[in-house]
Amino acid sequence: MTTTAITNIGSLVTNDPAQGDGTPLGIFQNAAVVIDGDRIAWVGPADEAPAADRAFNANGRAVIPGFVDSHSHLVFAGDRTAEFNARMSGSSYAAGGIRTTVAATRAATDAELEANLLRHLDEARRQGTTTFETKSGYGLTVADEARALRIAAAHTEEVTYLGAHIVSPDYADDPAGYVDLVTGDMLEACAPYARWVDVFCEKGAFDGEQARAILTAGAAAGLIPRVHANQLSHGPGVQLAVELEAASADHCTHLTDADVDALAQAADTTVATLLPGAEFSTRAQWPDARRLIDAGATVALSTDCNPGSSYTSSMPFCIALAVRDMRMTPDEALWSATAGGARALRRTDIGRIAPGARADLALLDAPSHVHLAYRPGVPLVSAVWQKGVRAH
């Protein structure tokens, strides 16, 4: 198997506190990394690097783990430019806007949906994302939800069944009937393609008892729960996520002290995934990352890339927002966008640069990861290795 040494790395973030400077980021200065196949084989000081078949000179630039985007909605058609324009002109955001995307997605062919998915994945990869989770939720029929997951599963192992995005327009007068469909025939058709089950627990979507029924049914079918929780208002989503040992409670914008305490107590089980692109795109209240971190919760950052409320695939942009508006330090934001996302996906092979981990790395055209927040909007990612292969 061919080995590759990335040498002359000015600053290497490993996310392994047993390495480098002993901080949570485990930073080495003047470092090297050796890749063997799709795995990291060696990490350490550049002058101690073992021989390799090929070499890549980082020329003093920074190398970080590939970003882990643990929350996105990439199987869709159409866009919602008009809705965004109206919102920026004074209209408020509501969950019902999803229906516009549902109509466009149902009308699209499989080839059109896959082409759109691949376009967004390429866009994200060029910005350093090497692992992504994505969801269904824009079909809301048995056939359309199953095809969305089948298309997604061809391109990522992190696929989430989100038949419970909103109540289908076809069941507008029978929400209980739609919950029966989501927990019955739709779940049976979708479970073979998915690893996770999710629900939008929110006013205008699903209440606590409906969410509990959906997540419990999904778990019985072998899927692991995640929850869209407390985005637009306070509700039962966070407490339900903790109770059901969901892998993540996502959004976490409107939290009581009890919610924060619950997430802190469940730090080893349920990750608080914050999605600042949504607040940016809806002019909503920012999640208080500082409050969660100081309480001891595990925090992840993700894009929530979707056509309605957060149409960005840029993890660097979300890092900049988290530092500027959510009171995270640059170190915390990078950890949350890499190792934190891995925790939200219950993965130990990604989000870090250490022997045995998957060889997912990003080279920055900068001397330090701090530039991700220091230089917002600048395309700093100059090279990406995904599973040991340099992406072009």
Image (spheres, rainbow, N blue to C red):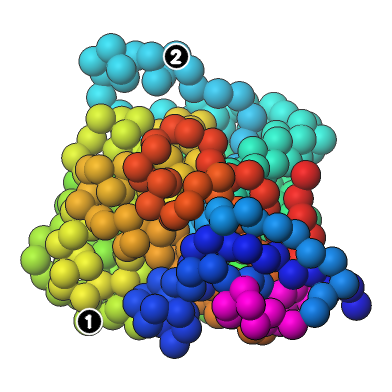
Q: How many numbered marks have been drawn onto this rendered protein structure?
A: 2
- Is disc 2 surrounded by few (<14), some (14 to 19) or many (20+) residues within 10 Å? few
Which residue matches tag 2? Answer: 82
Percent coordinates x, y for residue 11 in the rendering: 49, 63
Side of 83 where 359 appears, left or right: right
Determine whether the residue tagged by mark 1 lies in a helix, strand or loop.
helix
Q: In which quarter of the image is the N terminus?
A: bottom right
Residue drawn at 25 percent across, 24 percent down: 92
Instruction: Give the magenta-colored segment's residue range.
Output: 34-50
Amino acid of disc 2: Ala
Percent coordinates x, y for residue 354 in the rendering: 59, 80
Disc on res. 265 = 1
Residue drawn at 61 percent across, 24 percent down: 78
Q: Which residue lies furthest to the right in this view?
A: 1
Does residue 156 belong to the magenta stretch? Answer: no
Q: Which badge, 1 or 2, is on the more N-terminal residue?
A: 2
Q: Quadrant of the C terminus?
A: top right
Determine whether the residue tagged by mark 2 lies in a helix, strand or loop.
helix
* Camera-side residue of 304 and 10: 10
